[in-house]
Structures are given as C-alpha cells and as structure tokens.
Image: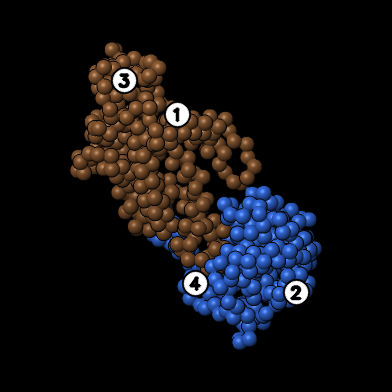
Chain colours: A blue, B brown
Amino acid sequence: MGKNGDLAGEGQLLTVKDVRIRFTQERHSLFEKKRKKEVLKGVSFSMREGEVLGLVGESGCGKSTLAKVILGLEKAESGEVIHRSQHPQMVFQDPYGSLNPAKRIGWILEEPLRIRGGYTAQERRARALAMLGRVGLEEKIAERYPSQLSGGQRQRVCIGAALMLEPKLLIADEAVSALDVTIQAQVLSLLLSLKEEMGLAILFISHDMRVVYQMCDRVLIMKDGQFVESGDVDTVYFSPRHPYTKELLVAAGIREETEK
Amino acid sequence: MKKKKSKNYKIGATITGVLLFFILVGLFWTPYDPDAMDNASKLAGVSFSHIMGCDNFGRDIFSRVLEGSKITLFVAVGTVAIGTLCGIVVGAFTGYYGGIVDELFMRINDALFAFPSILLGLVFISLLGSGKYNVIVALGVAFIPSFARIVRSEFIRCKNMDYVKSAKLAGAGDLRIMFVHILPNVMTVLSSSIMIGFNNAVLAEAGMSYLGIGVQPPDASLGRMLSEAQTYLFSAPGFALFPGIVLILMVLGFSLLAEGIKEGAGYA
C-alpha cells in the first residue's frame, strides 16, 4: 500500500492516476507575478464496484477539486482519470442550491431522462414517481417546488435525481453536512440501502470522521493536495500511522490524546 | 404557488385591466369614426353626444383616445418585445460564456447606455424616417442594452449554482442549460423590468409623437393628441386633459404592476 492509496490496475470502476492541477491566483497589483497554487499534487487511487470510499481532509485541501476532476467539470493538468462507469453523478452539499427553484420536483427528476432521450412522457413520469418512492418520499411531492420542501427532503430529491440515469458511481460531496443530526442519519441510511439495491459505488467526501466510519469500507486521508494515509477504515482509525490522521481522530474525539 | 398578491399588484392589475378592456372595445367599435371631421362641433365641450368633447377639427376625442391608446400600446408592446427578445439572447450568451465577447458586448452596451433611450430613438428615427413601425424599431433597439444588462447579471449569478452543475452532469448542452434551466429563474426579475420597460416605451412614444417625429397623422396617438392640443389649452382644456389622464393611468397601472411583481417575487 503506497503513500498514494491503492494503485490497482484493470477491473476497477474508477482509476485516478497521478492527477495534478494548479489554479492561477488573482493578482493583487499589476506588477505582481502571476502565481500558481498547486491544489492537487499528484493523487492516485482506485475504486472497486459497490465500494464506499471515504475522502477526508480539512477545508481547502482539494477534496472538492478532486471530485470535479473525476466528474470532468474541471480539467487536470496532468494525469488521467479512467472510468468504467458511464455517468458518474454527484450530490452536492447545499440542498438549497442544487435544485432548480423554478421547476417542480417531478420535472427535475425527469430531466436526466429527457436529456438522454428515448423515453415517452409516461415512461419518464413513471420512473420519476418510482424514484420518489425509492428515496422515501411521497408521490405528491412531484408537484411541489423545491422551496416547499425541507432540507432533508431536498437532499433526498437530489439523491433521486442523481440516480435517475442509474450510475455506477455516486460522489457525495459533504452531502449531509448541511442537515441536522437526525436527518443526517436518515439520509445516510438511505444512501447505504440504495447502494445495496443498485450496486452503487459511493465516493463519500466529508470532514466528519465519525460519519465516515459509519459509512465507508475504505478511507483516504488528504492534506494539502496529497493523500497522507489510506486503507480500511478499521486499520486507519485504530492504528493510524501518519500524525495528521492522529490529529484528525483526536479532534473528532475518537482517539485519546495521551498516546504518542 | 399560494401567495397573497400585494395591494400594488391588485390596483395595478385593475387599472391596466380597465384600460385594456376599453382598448379592446375600441378595436371593434368607437362611438364615432376617429378621423371623421365635423365643422359644427369644433372644439365642442363635454356633452352627452361627445363625452370627452371634440378637437379642433371636430373629431370626437373619446374615439380618438381609444384609437390613440391602441396605437400607443401597440408601439409599447412592439418596442418591449424587440428589446426583451434581443436583450435575452445577448444577455444570456455574454453572461453564460463570459470572456472576451462578453467584454466587447458590454462595452458597446455601456456606450449605448450612456445615451438616454429617447435620444437614441431620435437618432434612429432620423436615419429611418418617422412612422409607427420605425418608432417601434428605433425604440426597441434603444431598449436592448438595459434588458441585456439585467439578463446578463442574472445569468452570471445563476451559472455557478449547483443545479446548473447537476444539469451538466446529466449531459445537458449549453443551450438547454441557458434557456431551459437558467432562463425561468431570470423571469421573475425580468418580468418586473418588462413592466417598467412598458412604461418607458409609452412615455418615449408619447414624447416622440409630441415632438412630431413619432406616429404621423392621421394616426392618432396619445402623444400626438397632446401636441395638437397645446394650442387650445385654455379654450378647450378637455382636448389635452383626457389623453393626458389616459397616459397617466397607463403608466401608473404598469408601474404598480411592476412593483407588485417585484414584491411577490422570490421562490425561496
């Protein structure tokens, strides 16, 4: 097991090889040199089918950038991302910004099918209603606007919309951080049951060590654009090797500070 | 959505509704032919046969007001339609893509914006010649910058929202994202500025016709009637008063509607 996580070859759902990306910083004055900040410093990892992989790290360490690179929303400067899944989808952190406020829930759920094409209006409607049932919402919600739903309901709709195209890989970027604790638990168990049902692999990005432990099979610890530790959750949580991992575990109250 | 409409909205809708009703009636029926002259009733006062009196040629003012507000409204609708449609297209593309084209368009926009739209209208009219269709084109072009600016800023606000990213992930093309996903969110802001645009168009048309470069005789327009009436302001005050009142009501109705839409806006 290398410093950069498991670098396995074929047969993987997703393989990320030595991805690097730099952002140009804004100049504050005309004569200042253009500076580039390295956000991802050569990260590599891979994911199996049906696996839940945790990605932990402090804010600004490059977690979300990595997610965007995987989804193709951001272009890496070097390195490669190899997918075997057709349409990786994403659930965003803020359930208020990720549903179009001008559209009804039913429309939002049908939209991915409409874009892909080849479905009749009845088929689309039927699938959207079925998906509402799957994510634990009532059918009448299809006629509502996002502003009429609670945060937990919205996040369920977001998950449903992401799953309409039946992706093999779902990226959840801080998907429950904006919800209160009881709702969080419900949404997490929904994700886990959907994973079983659909054979979904989930890349679970979070800063909450406890939630990651509940959810994930393996975990990657990220600091300043690099992975510092990776492995099975039990191994990483109970015998961490890197001081940063220890620090995170102590901060989350999972580990006692006294050990040295 | 269940939302209590504001007082502004109700009053504005009532005024506009009543005016629209009269204009609609005026399309099919006016008490007299608006162009028929009658020497006997020159500058006649308010009476049962002529409820708003007659003008200097003995034409029935009520009929002419109906006819005139019809033309004024037609010009306003045409102007706003041109301004809005072109404004949406320009604003959507510049706001969504940004970059050098955006810079270029916005600088042109700034330059156009620096002139009052009525002045721009005057320039176009002097190039195109007068008449109601030319007025529509001239004012419509002059109105594009203000709409483009509103649409552009809304597109910039919306384009980084997560729902746009979701749509991209689902495989939606740029055009679909712009006009199906983002545009409906722009509509609330846009609809109140459309109402304000109506106002400006009504006033601009009246102003241009008053100056004698807008709608040409024998077509009646509220502005033309005011300009014809100014010579008779003291001998026949009704001649200027009634078109003026209708003009004020029209503008008032639209601005109250705009206020009302603004108050009722916001989905979240």
Identify the residue under disc 4: A76
Asked whether the beta carbons under mark 2 and mark 3 sit within 8 Å of each other, the answer is no
Residue type pointed to by label 4: Ala
Residue B233, above or below B177: above
Q: CA distance from mark 4 to mark 1?
A: 56 Å
Judge the density around disc 3: few (<14), some (14-19), many (≥20) Cα neighbours within 10 Å. many
Identify the residue under disc 3: B54
Q: Do badges 4 and 3 share one subunit? A: no
Residue B225, above or below A247: above
Q: Secondary structure at mark 3?
A: loop
Q: Secondary structure at mark 4?
A: loop
Residue B254 x %, y %: 45, 34
Identify the residue under disc 1: B252
Asked whether the beta carbons under mark 4 and mark 3 sit within 8 Å of each other, the answer is no
Asked whether the beta carbons under mark 4 and mark 1 sit within 8 Å of each other, the answer is no
Which corner quadrant of the image does residue B247 belong to?
top left
Q: CA distance from mark 4 to mark 3?
A: 77 Å
Residue type pointed to by label 2: Glu
Q: Specify whether A129 is left or right of B266.
A: right
Q: CA distance from mark 2 to mark 4?
A: 32 Å
Residue type pointed to by label 3: Cys
Residue type pointed to by label 1: Leu
Please tell me whether mark 2 or mark 1 is closer to you in this view: 1
Residue A125 x %, y %: 64, 64
Identify the residue under disc 2: A196
